[in-house]
Amino acid sequence: MVKKFTVSNLHKLLYHWSYFWQKIFAIFRQLFAKKPRNGKLALHAMFKNEADFLKEWLDFHFAHGVDFIRLTNDNSDDNFAAVLEPYRQMGILEWEDSIAHPDFYVREEFHKNKALRDLGKDYQWIAFIDSDEYIFPLPGDELKTHLPQSEKCGGLVLNWLMYGSAHVEKIEAGELLIEKLNRRFPDLYAENYTMKTIVQSGYGARFFNKNPHYPLYSPFARLRWQDGQEFRPSEKRLLLSPLHIKHYWYRTEKFYREEKRARRIFFEGTERREILERWHYERSNAVYDPIDPLFMKKINAWREEC
């Protein structure tokens, strides 16, 4: 019996055809791209109306060894430029405006791949996270201490831990978000199995199919977990040491009410049922998990040096 050919079948066929050729292109990129071996680490993120949180996020990552940050402004209308300008003048940060496209995921993918091309010329490693995500090493360490040494590694995948608001209304002047927001979901919560990627430049990686979590990679330079095991998209693992991401999804109560909830509706297309919303909120604050004081000391030391 001949199966009926549908639009869905056509989409699947086109996807697999595109995926096949992207893999071929990844191999060619790996063969011919420049491969910096300087150990330098850059970071890329996209943001919108997050001026109140950007300074701490920047200071944290610079304090823990990030060499350069590129940010993409996605139509913000707050005072983000005033926050970023001192870092730009120091030569450790640049920002750009996002392209004019109605689909957020198209904009995001475009700028991630642009960062791969541009930053990949001068930085061996490029971390791709969001501005509510912090990459944590072991207390006292720098992030670069724990990056792979293998030349055939396309990058490192990191799990995250999802944090709640800890019932904090707002972060006051002089306070640190990472210190105040000290409650999170339990370790085995499903969303903690999500990952983001630190890509090694020159080994063929390219973001594809609107997937912000990990890029398409060359079969000869696979992504790896922190223990050296090859990353396979179908396999769920949870490795939280020596590196992991703390994802401050809710941020503060004020931010959740005024910004986050509306954003989630935009991305998901609908609001959660109230019973599910309440469950998610309560679980997000289930585990008390205070930050080691060494992290705050490193931030303060970096600020004093600058």
Image (tube, rainbow, N blue to C red):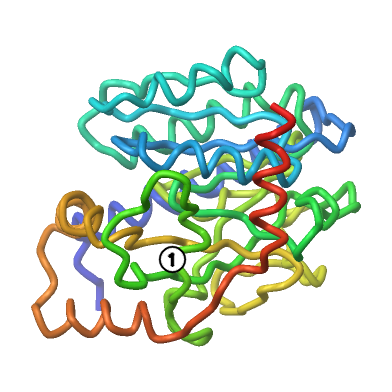
- Residue name at image x 78 percent, y 72 percent: 229
- Residue name at image x 83 percent, y 31 percent: 35
Q: How many marks?
A: 1
Q: Quadrant of residue 69?
A: top right
Disc 1 is placed on an element classified as loop
- Rendered-image quadrant of the C terminus: top right
- Residue name at image x 76 percent, y 68 percent: 242
Residue 29 drawn above or below residue 288? above
Residue 89 drawn above or below residue 9? above
Of 193 and 171, nearer the camera is: 171
Q: Name the residue under label 1.
A: 181
Residue 110: x and y in percent read 43, 30
Of 232 and 247, nearer the camera is: 247
- Residue name at image x 66 percent, y 49 percent: 198
Of 254 and 233, nearer the camera is: 254
Residue 145 drawn above or below residue 243? above
Q: How crowded is mark 1: few (under 14 residues within 10 Å), some or many (20 or more)?
A: many
Q: What residue type is labelled 1?
A: Leu
Residue 112: x and y in percent read 51, 35
Residue 127 shown left or right of residue 166 in the figure: right
Residue 95: x and y in percent read 48, 21
Q: Quadrant of residue 231?
A: bottom right
Residue 87: x and y in percent read 58, 22
Q: Is residue 28 visible?
A: no
Residue 54 shown left or right of residue 205 in the figure: left
Q: Is residue 163 visible?
A: yes
Query: Farthest residue in the top direction?
Result: 89
Residue 256 drawn above or below residue 237? above
- Rendered-image quadrant of the N terminus: bottom left
